[in-house]
Amino acid sequence: MPQSFQTASADETVALGGKLAAQLAPPKLVLLRGELGAGKTTLVKGIVAGFGAGAEQEVTSPTFTLVHEYRAPTATLYHIDLYRVDTQRELETLGIDDLLSSRSVLLIEWGEKFERFRRERDVEVALEHISGDQRRITILD
């Protein structure tokens, strides 16, 4: 059953990510879906902090590097951004399969562009910009 939340600030979105971390025991593949500026990376800041893998200010969008890695005592988190990846061939060059392990949590932005991730995902998080700093965040299992 979907869970829906509304946040009114970036801090609230980060805090929700911290709470969500408790539900993401590895191995997990998480799709983060939403338009540009919807708050996907802001949510990841909280998830990374919730795992104890880094401080929220250390988390940045991997738009150009495509993959950021964060190591926690219980998991390795990979924040992946597929916005600039358009073809299956480009996707294959990233080596995402090499990141999968019993300790990994893959947090994939724009993964819905590829059928494979829509099928294989464990959790999908849809973020919607309502107005100003308000976001609607829906978690689908």
Image: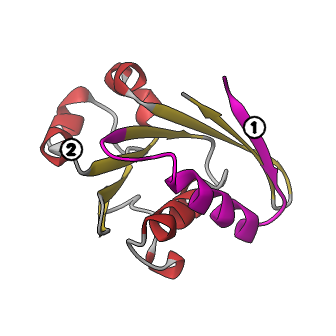
- Label 2, residues with CA under 10 Å away: few <14, some 14-19, many ≥20: few
Residue 38 spot, x, y in % from top left: 67, 50
* Label annotation for residue 4: 1
- Would residue 42 be counted in the magenta stretch? no
Q: Quadrant of the N terminus?
A: top right
Q: From what the image shows, is residue 120 above or below residue 54?
A: above
95 to the left or right of 33: left
- Residue at (39%, 47%) from the top-left corner? 25
- Residue at (54%, 59%) from the top-left corner? 41
Residue closer to the observer: 9 or 24: 24
Residue closer to the observer: 116 or 28: 28
Q: Are marks 2 and 1 in contact (CB under 8 Å)?
A: no
114 to the left or right of 35: left
Q: CA distance from mark 2 to mark 1?
A: 28 Å
Q: What amino acid type should be assigned to the residue bearing mark 1?
A: Ser
Residue 138 spot, x, y in % from top left: 69, 37
Residue 12 spot, x, y in % from top left: 75, 64
- Residue at (30%, 61%) from the top-left corner? 74
Mark with earlier residue (2, 1) = 1
Mark closer to the observer (2, 1): 2
- Would residue 12 be counted in the magenta stretch? yes
Q: From what the image shows, is residue 115 above or below residue 67?
A: above
Q: What amino acid type should be assigned to the residue bearing mark 2?
A: Ser
Residue 115 location, quadrant: top left
Residue 2 spot, x, y in % from top left: 68, 27
Residue closer to the observer: 120 or 75: 75
Q: Quadrant of the C terminus?
A: top right
Magenta residue span: 1-28
* Label annotation for residue 102: 2
- Label 1, residues with CA under 10 Å away: few <14, some 14-19, many ≥20: few
Q: Secondary structure at mark 2?
A: loop
* Label annotation for residue 39: none
